[in-house]
Image (cartoon, rainbow, N blue to C red):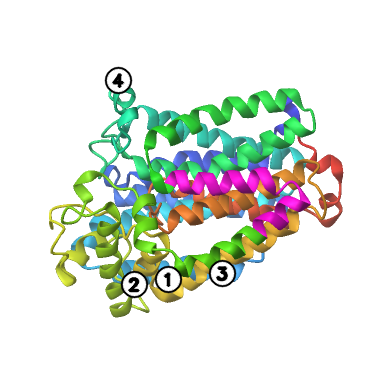
């Protein structure tokens, strides 16, 4: 690999600014307010640098309006709506993480389409971050034993990274780890399959090496909602490269929708839904726990429809306003165990609509990457991987949540940034096979 081809001063200066400021945004309690203001100024200076070096403040995407509405309107409202003590404890720290991710998103979107080397670099970095999450999780997760066969394995894994973050003193949440990996694993899986089909042996071997630790940690997480999402994502990766496979996925989806009304939802979700034993409600299945939390979440959305109840505050306010008699008030439910319900609680219904609009526009772009016939080349397999990630993660998000403002939130921003970066690639390059053949 010729590393000189990948050097780009405008991009690397912005990347350096993001790296310098990340600790302050992710651990604000360890820094003064003056240092925080200074770092915000550094990130803003990155936009001035971008305007000076490449001639734009940011690259336009189809999702500009909902993104800016969510961050410039609903995010401040979500902080204002939070009660004072909870604002300091939960809302402001999560908002700062979202602000940093906002700058990260526009850095990727603004630079990825400028050169094929940069686009490739972002994809490589995306997979690398997935490996980093997997390795950190391997030695820092609070492993559960919902699958007895794995108990002896996870009991032998040391946990030197446990307690690294506040609110995770006993280790990272295994379900959160599984959800974060579902943003990355399907993309790498699809690109590895593409490398195998196009006989790029070196890229294929690298892809296998990247997949292995993520797949291991996903298996050890014992997250049944994570397993469900991965199975759906794998089905998309396996079938979508073929025209007949895409028809099969469409017909299968229609059949499921037709059959679903006649299936016992409680029984089905009771098998799929995953939670530690302490979350069981009144001795019932873990799905019973979620039913109680979802009911409280729906009451909260009804009462705080336009503003939300405050970013990250549902975990405390729910017990005050909507007592869940079968769950101890001392137990930290963390979130609503549904990404979309939690987003409505955080940002109100206007924020949820904005978020759904971003997802819808992202899907539209992903579909434009899919081939009309059988998949050949990088562009097609990238589109398949991105589609699989959205489908798999959305399925997971119905039963759990990597909530907005949580520390793994950067992986959501990076996935969406990669998708919307495809819209910034000049039209001539979009049809250039060399741009997409990055193996």
102 or 32: which is nearer to us? 102
Residue position marked by numbered label 2 in the rendering: 308
- Does residue 231 show up magenta in the picture? yes
Labels 1 and 4 touching (C-beta < 8 A)? no
Q: Residue at the location (63% across, 35% down)?
A: 124
Q: CA distance from mark 1 to mark 4?
A: 45 Å
Residue position marked by numbered label 1 in the rendering: 74
Q: Main secondary structure of the magenta part?
A: helix
Please tell me which of labels 3 and 2 falls first in the chain: 2
Q: Nearer the viewer, mark 3 or mark 1?
A: 3
Within 10 Å of disc 1 (Cα), the crowding (few <14, some 14-19, many 20+) is: many
195 or 303: which is nearer to us? 195
Q: Position of residue 306 (x, y in %)?
A: 37, 79
Please tell me which of labels 1 and 4 falls first in the chain: 1
Q: Is residue 234 above or below residue 322?
A: above
* Residue 1 in view, yes or no: no
Labels 3 and 1 touching (C-beta < 8 A)? no
Residue position marked by numbered label 3 in the rendering: 357
**From the viewer's perspective, is 46 left or right of 149?**
right
Q: Is residue 399 above or below residue 300?
A: above
Q: Quadrant of residue 178?
A: top left
**From the viewer's perspective, is 310 left or right of 219?**
left
Q: CA distance from mark 2 to mark 1?
A: 9 Å
**From the viewer's perspective, is 288 left or right of 420?**
left
Residue position marked by numbered label 4 in the rendering: 156
Q: Quadrant of residue 117?
A: top right
Q: Is residue 364 above or below residue 113?
A: below
Q: CA distance from mark 3 to mark 4?
A: 44 Å
Stretch in magenta: 226-250
Please tell me which of labels 3 and 1 falls first in the chain: 1
- Helix, strand or loop at label 4? It is loop
């Amino acid at each position: 690999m010729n590393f000189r081809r990948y050097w780009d001063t405008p991009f690397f200066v912005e990347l350096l600014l993001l790296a310098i400021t990340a600790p302050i945004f992710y651990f604000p309690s360890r820094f003064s307010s003056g240092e925080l203001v200074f770092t915000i100024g550094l990130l803003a200076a990155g936009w001035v640098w971008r305007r000076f070096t490449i001639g734009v403040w940011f690259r336009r995407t189809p999702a500009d309006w909902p993104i800016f509405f969510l961050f410039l309107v609903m995010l401040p409202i979500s902080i204002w709506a939070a009660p004072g003590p909870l604002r300091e404890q939960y809302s402001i720290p999560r908002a700062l993480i979202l602000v940093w991710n906002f700058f990260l998103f526009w850095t990727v979107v603004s630079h990825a389409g400028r050169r094929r080397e940069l686009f490739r670099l972002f994809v490589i970095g995306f997979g690398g971050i997935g490996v980093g999450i997997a390795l950190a999780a391997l030695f820092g997760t609070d492993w559960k034993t919902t699958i007895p066969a794995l108990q002896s394995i996870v009991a032998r894994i040391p946990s030197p990274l446990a307690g690294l973050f506040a609110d995770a003193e006993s280790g990272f949440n295994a379900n959160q780890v599984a959800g974060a990996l579902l943003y990355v694993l399907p993309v790498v899986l699809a690109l590895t399959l593409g490398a195998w089909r196009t006989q790029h042996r070196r890229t294929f071997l690298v892809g296998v090496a990247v997949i292995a630790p993520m797949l291991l940690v996903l298996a050890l997480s014992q997250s049944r909602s994570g397993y469900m999402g991965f199975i759906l994502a794998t089905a998309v990766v396996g079938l979508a490269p073929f025209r007949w496979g895409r028809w099969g996925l469409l017909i299968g989806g229609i059949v499921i929708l037709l059959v679903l009304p006649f299936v016992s939802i409680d029984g089905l979700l009771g098998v799929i839904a995953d939670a530690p034993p302490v979350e069981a409600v009144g001795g019932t299945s873990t799905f019973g726990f979620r039913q109680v939390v979802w009911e409280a979440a729906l009451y909260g959305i009804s009462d705080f429809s336009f503003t939300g109840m405050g970013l990250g505050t549902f975990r405390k306010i729910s017990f005050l306003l909507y007592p869940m008699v079968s769950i101890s008030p001392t137990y930290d439910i963390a979130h609503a165990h549904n990404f979309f319900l939690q987003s409505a609680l955080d940002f109100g219904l206007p924020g949820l609509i904005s978020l759904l609009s971003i997802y819808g526009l992202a899907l539209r772009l992903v579909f434009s990457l899919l081939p009309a016939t059988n998949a050949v080349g990088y562009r097609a397999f990238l589109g398949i991987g991105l589609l699989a990630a959205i489908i798999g993660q959305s399925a997971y998000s119905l039963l759990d949540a990597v909530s907005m403002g949580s520390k793994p939130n950067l992986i959501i921003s990076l996935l969406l940034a990669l998708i919307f970066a495809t819209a910034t690639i000049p039209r001539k390059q979009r049809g250039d096979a060399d741009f997409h053949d990055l193996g």
